[in-house]
Amino acid sequence: MVMRLDKLREGKAKILYATDDPQLLIQYFKDDATAFNAQKRGTILNKGVINNHISTILFQFLTREGIPNHFVDRLSDREMLVKRCDIIPLEVVQRNLLAGSLAKRMGREEGAVLPFPVLEYYYKNDALGDPMINADHAVAFGLASREDLTAIETITRRVNDFLRAYFDQMGICLVDFKLEFGWHKGSGGPTLLLADEITPDGCRLWDKSTREKLDKDRFRRDLGRVEEAYQRVYRLVCASVS
Ligand code: TMP
Ligand code: ASP
């Protein structure tokens, strides 16, 4: 059993703690919710517990699919043991349907199926409001190498193929999602791992038949019944393993 030590970093939705194993960290999931670069703040009751459980199940599936990720174990309702990573300051967004900031940027209604999954990069920088950048920017500013981006893109597309089919069979459309990656410095040299979380905080999930939103957009857009939406996704994801 690892021992939880000092708090290393507190983010908007999670806290990272050191452990007595220098290669491992504890990721603690909070109920806090923010939107629009933390201009809007609130809490979603039990979100931390739900997101920890959902992320655990999804990382376990992805591990079985051979997708390298930071998940090691779920320690408690809100704590996940993960491999220590130096996070690459990129938010990698993959979109299947038109929604959110892309719909706004292109001046179109949300909901159209995109002709192919669209990949975007955002520079993870709160002071700048996470601006969208392209691959050349990421390389030119030393955030990642060309080879790193190729690997990130390949993993992201495989995650999309898996998650899209997974959610589809439970009646949910995976509209888009955000991933983060990091470098784990293990004994065999650095390895690129999928990190962070995969939860309704960072995915758009729509009911396939009613198109009802079952994700953080309910909080961002004041749509109500936020907890109910998270609970529903939680129940469906739990049912997929029982
Ligand atoms: P966007 O349409 O607002 O750019 O969001 C695309 C996806 O990325 C959506 O599934 C929500 C997720 N996302 C985050 O996880 N964190 C963020 O800060 C933002 C803006 C979006
Ligand atoms: N990352 C956003 C924030 O900074 C939250 C979001 O829109 O998902 O508050």
Image: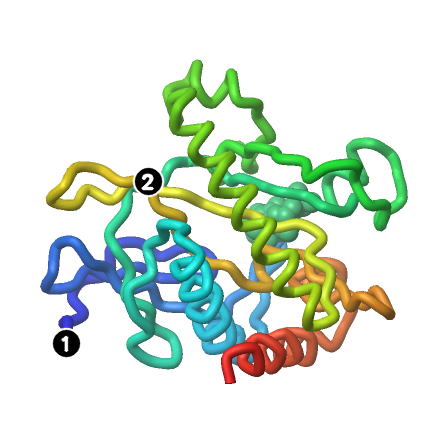
Q: Residue at x 83, y 64 (%)?
A: 211
Residue most extreme to the front: 65
Spatial CA distance of label 2 from label 1 is 26 Å
Checking the image for residue 145, the label placed there is none
Pick whichever, 30 or 164, lies toward us.
164
The label number, if any, that marks residue 1 in the structure image:
1
Residue 205: give x, y in percent of width and height.
Answer: 69, 62
- Asked which secondary structure carries label 2, the reply is strand
In this rendering, does residue 221 appear at all? Answer: yes
Left or right, residue 242 beside residue 22: right
Going by the numbered disc 2, the residue's amino acid type is Leu
Residue 120 appears at what percent x and percent y?
61, 33
Decide if residue 220 is on the left or right side of residue 55.
Answer: right
Local packing at callout 2 (Cα closer than 10 Å; few below 14, some 14-19, many 20+) is many
Q: Quadrant of residue 64?
A: bottom left
Which mark, by number, is residue 192? Answer: 2
CB-based contact (under 8 Å), mark 2 and mark 1: no
Q: Going 51% across and 40% down the picture, which residue do you hit?
A: 91
Q: Measuring 46% from the left and 75% from the top, which residue is drawn there?
A: 53
Question: Relative to residue 202, is residue 200 depicted above or below?
Answer: below
Question: Considering the image in quadrants, where does the N terminus appear?
Answer: bottom left
Q: What colouring does the structure picture have?
A: rainbow
**Cβ of disc 2 within 8 Å of ligand 1?**
no
The percent position of residue 18, horizontal first and vertical second, equals 19, 60
Q: Is residue 127 visible?
A: no
